[in-house]
Image (cartoon, rainbow, N blue to C red):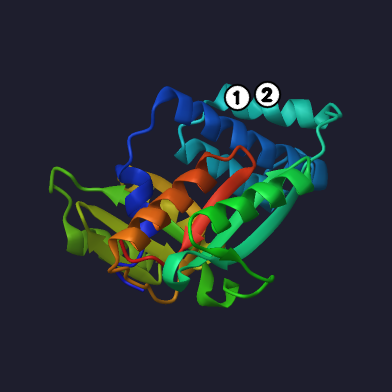
Amino acid sequence: MSGHSKWANIKHKKEKTDAQRAKVFTKIGKEITIAVKEGGGDPASNAKLRDLILKAKSNNVPNDNIERTIKKALGGSNENYEEIVYEGYGPAGIAVIVETTTDNRNRTAGNVRSYFSKYHGNMGQTGCVSYLFSEKGVIVIGNEDGDIDEDKLMELALESGAEDFAAEDEMFEIYTEPDDLYAVKEALEGAGYELLSAEKSKVPSNYVSLDSEDDIKFMELLIEKLEDDDDVMNVYHNWEN
């Protein structure tokens, strides 16, 4: 698995505009609304909400926004969302998982299907590619200045419960079992490390390269269109790029 979190590389190298940031806030707000309605507003007893608060903070969502969303959901918000996962194939058979939160499943399914079709992919049945991915906690620490001692960081991460560690492209990627994410995160922050993100993710077991310029272009467009869709929360794939 080492060195294979292209998800993290793409996510954290990409500059977010104010509009993109606002869209991220809105999407996470939908997920929080669902979590609160399902399990209440206390993150201590609602693991899903705890995950989402961590995700929100990793994406620089202000605490006020998080608290406002929780209170609104507790107050009987009439927004009714459901979570639906779609699976399919991009150009040249690249595996793609699309997690959505929607108040209109027909709209969302139609949009996702059209993106796959337009950019030389196709939707598949549930389970067609999910077996290629594992649920993991992924922590990303930037090292653009090169002043972090890799051996020291790796030792702390592994002692705290991490299961894998990779140094790649001016950043360190630390992998945990999903339930160990918080303990490792708190240990690293307690030691003074600044985290770029700490989230649960789907990590592919292997990656596939694309050689054709057309395939690369269409795969980039497929990811872009999916991520820009208001109903799409997360996009995971096994493209080595």
Quadrant occupied by the N terminus: bottom left
Mark 1 closeness class: few <14, some 14–19, many ≥20 residues within 10 Å: some
Q: Choose between 237 and 166: the one closer to the eye.
A: 237
- Residue at label 1? 65
Q: Residue at x 53, y 35 (%)?
A: 24
State left or right for residue 149 relative to residue 2.
Answer: left
Q: Residue 196 in the image: x percent, y percent?
A: 36, 43
Q: Say which amino acid is labelled 1.
A: Asn
Placement of 168 over or under 22, stated as above or below: below
**Dot 2: what SS?**
helix
Q: Residue at x 83, y 28 (%)?
A: 77
Q: Residue at x 56, y 27 (%)?
A: 63
Q: Say which amino acid is labelled 2.
A: Arg
State left or right for residue 57 relative to residue 74.
Answer: left
Q: Choose between 225 and 5: the one closer to the eye.
A: 225
Q: Which mark is residue 125?
A: none
Q: Quadrant of residue 215?
A: bottom left
Any part of residue 139 in sight: no
Q: Residue 171 in the image: x percent, y percent?
A: 25, 52
Q: Residue at x 59, y 56 (%)?
A: 98
Placement of 68 over or under 202, stated as above or below: above
Q: Which mark is residue 68?
A: 2
Give the Cα separation between the discs numbered 1 and 2.
Answer: 5 Å
**Dot 1: what SS?**
helix
Any part of residue 191 in sight: yes
Q: Quadrant of residue 101?
A: top right
Placement of 238 over or under 65, stated as above or below: below
Residues tagged 1 and 2 counted as in contact (Cβ below 8 A): yes
